[in-house]
Amino acid sequence: MKALVLLSGGMDSGVLLAQSLTEFESIEAISFEYGSRHNHKELESAVLLAKKYDVTHTVIPLRFLDELFDSSLLQGGEPVPDGTYNQDNMRSTVVPFRNGIMLAVAVGYAENLEIDEVLIGSHSDDQGVYPDCRTDFTEKFSEAASLGTYTGVRVRSPFTALSKSGIAAVGRKLDFDFSLTWTCYKGHDLHCGLCAACNARKEALLFEEGKDPTRYEG
């Protein structure tokens, strides 16, 4: 079996990559350059992760997302919110149908290379904020992908029932190096430590207990 991992460079997709290498005979990774504020930092991490785990890594440009869509996550959008990671606070960071667009490209790429499954690191904390991270979305998209490809490509989100803290626990069991990953939505030289994404990372990696290896500005 072969799998294609959507590797953003964040901790969720990084742990997914590490876990997938224990389950599949062959793994490739794909990332997207789409114009988010933190995209350059994420891609740096994605490159490091692909090198560490010795997998073929392809970066695909999707800059039209930044040019056509409105979101505080994108370079042309309003400021990224600080505070807690919940639907009301994070709604502005939604990039319309981002995962759907990326998965569509990934499925075509997978069919071209005769790869069986496309894996995405969507988890339970994301489902209340991002519609295209929901379990039923991924399942329906997998059905469409299977119907729309000669090779019957499947899409799966192995962490769909896990929280970000649950993913962190999986990573620790795999001796995963979280310092190689990037989460902060602001895209500074260091994680800001204040935005909702950073706060979610801190909670998952047990910052208050001194177990988070991330360097923060604040």
Image: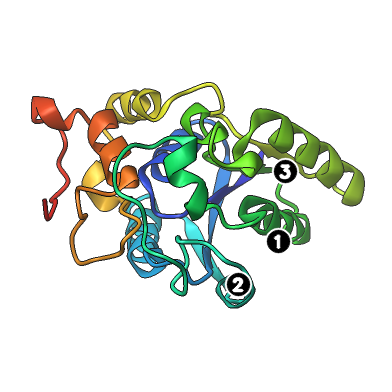
**What amino acid is labelled 2 in the image?**
Leu
Residue at the spot of label 1: 105
Q: CA distance from mark 3 to mark 2?
A: 24 Å
Answer few, some or many: residues within 10 Å of disc 3's Cα (few below 14, many 20 plus, some between 14 and 19): some
| Front residue of this view, candidates 120 and 93 | 93
Answer few, some or many: residues within 10 Å of disc 2's Cα (few below 14, many 20 plus, some between 14 and 19): some
Q: Position of residue 133 (x, y in %)?
A: 60, 39
Image vertical order of residue 173 relative to residue 57, above or below: above
Q: Is residue 8 left or right of residue 116?
A: left
Q: Which mark is residue 62?
A: 2
Proximity of marks 1 and 2: CB atoms separated by less than 8 Å: yes
| Picture mark count | 3
Camera-nearest label, 1 or 3: 1
Q: Position of residue 12 (x, y in %)?
A: 42, 40
Find numbered disc 1 in the image and state the secondary structure of the residue it sits on: helix
Proximity of marks 1 and 3: CB atoms separated by less than 8 Å: no
| N-terminal-most mark, 1 or 3 | 1
Residue at the spot of label 3: 116
Q: CA distance from mark 1 to mark 2?
A: 10 Å
Answer few, some or many: residues within 10 Å of disc 1's Cα (few below 14, many 20 plus, some between 14 and 19): some
